[in-house]
Image: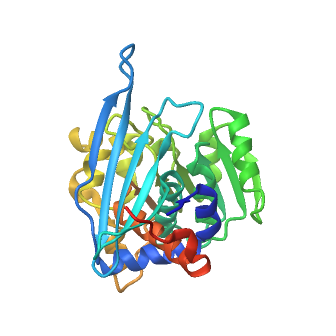
Amino acid sequence: MEFITAETIRATLQYPQLINALRDAFRSQQIEVPQRHHHHFRYSRDHHNENTLLLMPAWQANGYLGVKTVVVAPENREQPSIQGHYTIFDAATGTPRAVMDAASITAMRTAAASALAADYLAPTDASVLLMVGTGTLAPELIRAHTSVRPIKKVVVWGRSQEKAQRVLDAVADLPCDAAICSDIQQGMANADIVSCATLSKSPLLYGKWLRTGQHIDLVGAFRPDMREADDVLIKRVALYVDVMPHALSETGDLSIPLETGVITEQSIMGHLPSLCQSSAPATRSPITGFKSVGHALEDLVAASLVYNQLAEVQPSAVAPSAM
């Protein structure tokens, strides 16, 4: 059983296919997802910074069982901040089928989920995308959003212009103009979709900067002590999440305004299952917002697509080994 690399995963998965597969999975709700494990741990005796261990299982009857094991290390400057493995098993027999890079699975399924939400919520003629953040997710979010909306211009903001340029270089093949943004407020003034994927502990996006006709995609801030948007923004947008109830407690973008009474649980207008299952088109509000915290269903869908496609074209590469 060979390890499926990030390069193979990115060469195998295509966003239109992955987005539609997620849509079908959220609509059918045939994948079972138990509570995932979050374990925060100090990795050094010299300071109090913490990393996070995530264990995320999911399974489908007559299909696969998968478990993602990843470590999120925000202070890791030399390697990606998210690393780990995804293991996929035959659900009926328990036979391990493949082990694959988890970071690329996570990045692509996260971007696809954001694009799926945007397909329901963002203006149909959205043409300008502001990408806030320059990490692993940034190029994937750009590719995913441009696959569901007619994006003509992409602008990227980051604390480092060098890293912002790397993001632009990574998506240079896309048929749209691209530029570095030096001021988030100015970037938001012109953007139809704002996608934010950072590890910020304080807001980067402010409600006073919003304008009618925008869609805000909040992807980072995966812990209760992290925030990408201020209270005003969270209160002003028509707010959707990927899954309930995880989104209410796992990100500071929601848990903090919930604790302080800025919003209530009833402020959440829907989630990906409700959007995908609705027989009527979603009513697009003047300003929409989507907050994702990640879901093991998304991992299993992406990993299954990779495994099945590779099994069709090169069966020996994913053949099970004796355990």
Q: Is residue 252 above or below residue 97?
A: above
Out of 178 and 246, give the one closest to the viewer: 246
The single residue placed furthest to the bottom in the displayed view is 279
Q: Position of residue 263 (x, y in %)?
A: 26, 48
Q: Residue at x 41, y 40 (%)?
A: 230
Out of 65 and 152, give the one closest to the viewer: 65
Q: Is residue 227 above or below residue 293?
A: above
Out of 133 and 107, give the one closest to the viewer: 107
Q: Position of residue 38 (x, y in %)?
A: 28, 43
The single residue placed furthest to the top in the displayed view is 46
Q: Residue at x 42, y 62 (%)?
A: 299
Image quadrant of residue 320? bottom left
Q: Is residue 260 above or below residue 124?
A: above
Q: Is residue 12 left or right of residue 229?
A: right
Does any portion of residue 191 appear in the rendered image?
no
Q: Is residue 112 left or right of residue 59?
A: right
Q: Indicate the colouring scheme.
A: rainbow
Image quadrant of residue 182? top right
Q: Is residue 12 left or right of residue 105?
A: right
Q: Is residue 75 above or below residue 281?
A: above
Out of 222 and 180, give the one closest to the viewer: 222
Does any portion of residue 171 appear in the rendered image?
yes
Q: Position of residue 150 (x, y in %)?
A: 66, 71
Q: Position of residue 2 (x, y in %)?
A: 53, 61
The C terminus lies in quadrant? bottom left
